[in-house]
Image (cartoon, grey):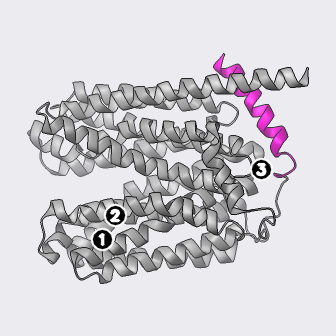
Amino acid sequence: MTNQTDKILSDQASSKQASSEQPSALGEYSLATITFWLAFGTFVIGCSEFAAMGLLPYFAEDFGITENVAGHAISAYAIGVVVGAPLITIFFSRLARRTMLISMMVFYAGGNLLTALAWSEWTMNIARFIAGLPHGAYFGIAMLFAADIAGKNKRAQAVSNVILGLAIANIIGVPSISGIGQMFGWRTGFFIISAFALVTALMVWKTAPYRGPNPDAKPLTELKALKNKDVLLVLLMGAIGFGGMFSVYSYFSASYLNTTSSPEWGISATLLIYGIGVTLGNIIAGRYSEGRLLTSAITFQVLLGLSAAAYAASMGNPYLMAASLFFIGIGGGMVVPLQTRLMDVAGEAQTLAGAMNHAAFNTANALGPWLAGMTLSAGYGYTSTGWVGLALAGGGVLVWLAIVMTARNTQVQTATVSG
């Protein structure tokens, strides 16, 4: 039944978007080249977001504060993402998407430059908040831009290719920036990220075709996304379902050190394995999600939940923990069908819906660790982080059921009107 629902929804989406998604003129650069530089932007953002966690002990020491207090900079960034995603996309919706992408990268360069120049806890928090503001807007607009120029039959793969930059950041970028920061000072890492953001802005300007602003785009039109039940359900699935990934990921290092007798380098090795899983999940989702978005979403969600349970059950065994994290990473491929589903249901509020998907992702980044932290504080041990992951994935499944029911009701209503 789900496959049938997927097929009908895919046909409906194709007919709705046929007029707006005609093959685009790419100019002198290929789709692969354009997508590469869009993905390089997500790579830069991933480096900044996650490397900040690895560099936290160093700027905490520099400012003379505890690591717990320094962690407020991480929260400030996440708040910036959630606040910036809707505000930027609403108030700048009339700008051409290419212009917005370039502007967001220049803005991001500035935020990371301010981070590198911070001289106290408060200036650091403010700088990270500013750096977080363009994060969600860039992701949402970049994926919409890539999907638009790729055409309706390759949307999921285009979205996957853009998100791939974030996955590769976890494998290569974050360890590299963290290592450079450890050797040459944490500020150096953020100076490099700022420079990379400027390179992205320049190359997007050079390679991406200028499509012109949307004359019909209005802030009030974008706000309709927040009243669209289909959009809200997809965002809710992301905010809850992805929480299972972060409940495990955030406490993995502590779990590894406290439950195994393996050397510390095993942490980096396991996180590399996790990053490979994330990359593979995005590739799989990009190739097989188009036309079967709901089936793909629930497959990744169930995989994430079962892998979180396996992680809890394997606590203390570093090899099984690594294997579980690998499959949790693959489960992260769920972002591709969810993002593509948003394109189908957002109507004229495409930009805001796309940006809010990454805000939902960051909500999961806050929800998962918070719930896992509560179970740890209650004395349930590190295995509880995996069980929290399973519970949140289960919540994502329940939201998915609501998405399917809503989709089928829409089909019935459409059939009734047509009849």
Q: Judge whether residue 355 is colored magenta.
A: no
Q: Disc 2 and disc 3: Cα gap in Å?
A: 37 Å
- Residue at the limit of the structure toward the top, as seen here: 1
Mark number displayed over residue 76: 2
Q: Disc 1 and disc 3: Cα gap in Å?
A: 41 Å
Mark 3, Cα crowd under 10 Å, few <14 / some 14-19 / many 20+, is: some
Nearer the observer: mark 2 or 3; the answer is 2
Q: Earlier in the sequence, mark 1 or mark 3?
A: 1
6 displayed left or right of 226 = right
Horizontal and vertical percent position of residue 107: 51, 76
Where does the magenta region start and end?
Answer: 1-21
* Residue type highlighted by circle 2: Ala
* Residue type highlighted by circle 3: Gly
Please give the residue where the numbered disc 1 appears in the rendered image.
125
Residue 370, by quadrant, is top left
Nearer the observer: mark 1 or 3; the answer is 1
Q: Quadrant of the N terminus?
A: top right
- Residue at the limit of the structure toward the right, as seen here: 419
Residue 258 can be seen, yes or no: yes
Contact check, label 2 and label 1, Cβ < 8 Å: yes
Residue 372, by quadrant, is top left
| Badge 1 element | helix
Q: Earlier in the sequence, mark 2 or mark 1?
A: 2
Mark number displayed over residue 233: none
Mark 1, Cα crowd under 10 Å, few <14 / some 14-19 / many 20+, is: many
Q: What is the total number of numbered labels drawn onto the structure image?
A: 3
Please give the residue where the numbered disc 3 appears in the rendered image.
151
Residue placed at 34% from the left, 48% from the top?
A: 366
Q: Main secondary structure of the magenta part?
A: helix
* Residue type highlighted by circle 1: Asn
